[in-house]
Image: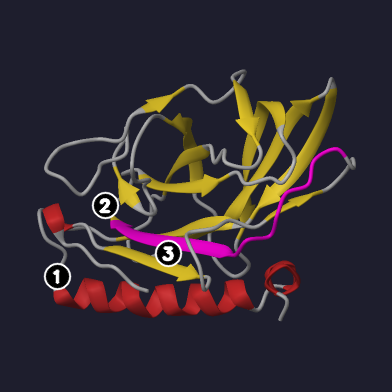
Amino acid sequence: MTRRSRRLGVATFVVLVSATAIAVALTATSGPWINFNVAGVYYGGVLTNPGDDADFSVILQSSSSKSITLLDLSLVPLPGFATPKLVHVALLGRSRNHPAGTTGWPPRTDIGNDVYPTRPAFGTRIEIGPGRLPILVYGVTGSRSGRLYGAAGVNLRFRVDGMVQTAEAFAGGFDCVQIFSRMATPAQLRQCYRLFARADTAQWNSPAVKLISGR
């Protein structure tokens, strides 16, 4: 499924690679006490001006009921593309939707000038497990016009049961940086489509995603 929006000149591209709902692939790197379920792979993309925020989210889904505390978050580079600068991290507040791919901070919704509610992520106790789907939102920026900045997802470092554990969440995003005023031009949109297609191919050819998706 692809969704596009040209509100305020911002094009939003969303790719959901799953037969069911929006999902995230998380792989625990140590410790048997957390079981992150592989429920699919998610990517989104937006078009921004240089230095503007591009925002993406990841659903933390686990089969184990636990309380974790987020200590650190960093970007997983997308091979062949520039890595954006991580500038914001937050937990999504109460909301019926989540920013699959949007702009601004706090992240904008698709309704007028509304923004998604957020709260601090670091140091906060996050409840995970069946029936609990906390959502992290992270904002990135790119500086060079005509370039696509890509993140394959995020590296998470968190405390659980008094121990520190790490995990990768392959729910990333693509930020196509262009210079425009209110509306991106058709030529700029076509260029971003081409770059998104290349980035999508590169992501799906990566060994980690092949392993997660079972291909």
Image label count: 3
Q: Residues within 10 Å of mark 2 (few under 14, many from 20)?
A: many
* Horizontal relation, residue 126 to residue 143: left or right: right
Question: What amino acid type should be assigned to the residue bearing mark 1?
Answer: Thr
Q: Residue 185 — which label?
A: 1
Question: What amino acid type should be assigned to the residue bearing mark 2?
Answer: Asn
Q: Which residues are magenta?
A: 33-47
Q: Which residue is mark 3?
A: 148
Extreme residue in the front direction: 131
Q: Position of residue 197 (x, y in %)?
A: 44, 79
Ranked by sequence position, the earlier of labels 1 and 2 is 2
Q: Which residue is mark 2?
A: 49
Q: Residue drawn 70% across and 27% down?
A: 68
Between 38 and 182, the one nearer to me in the picture: 38
Q: Position of residue 157 (x, y in %)?
A: 72, 34
Q: Are marks 1 and 2 in contact (CB under 8 Å)?
A: no
Q: Secondary structure at mark 2?
A: loop
Q: Residue drawn 50% across and 67% down?
A: 20
Q: Residue drawn 41% across and 73% down?
A: 196
Question: What amino acid type should be assigned to the residue bearing mark 3?
Answer: Leu
Q: CA distance from mark 3 to mark 1?
A: 16 Å
Q: CA distance from mark 1 to mark 2?
A: 13 Å
* Horizontal relation, residue 136 to residue 25: left or right: left
Between 116 and 151, the one nearer to me in the picture: 116
Q: Are marks 3 and 1 in contact (CB under 8 Å)?
A: no
**Is 123 rendered above or below residue 192?**
above
Ranked by sequence position, the earlier of labels 3 and 2 is 2
**What colouring style does the render use?**
secondary structure
Q: Position of residue 96 (x, y in %)?
A: 33, 42
* Residue 72 on the magenta span: no
Q: Secondary structure at mark 3?
A: strand
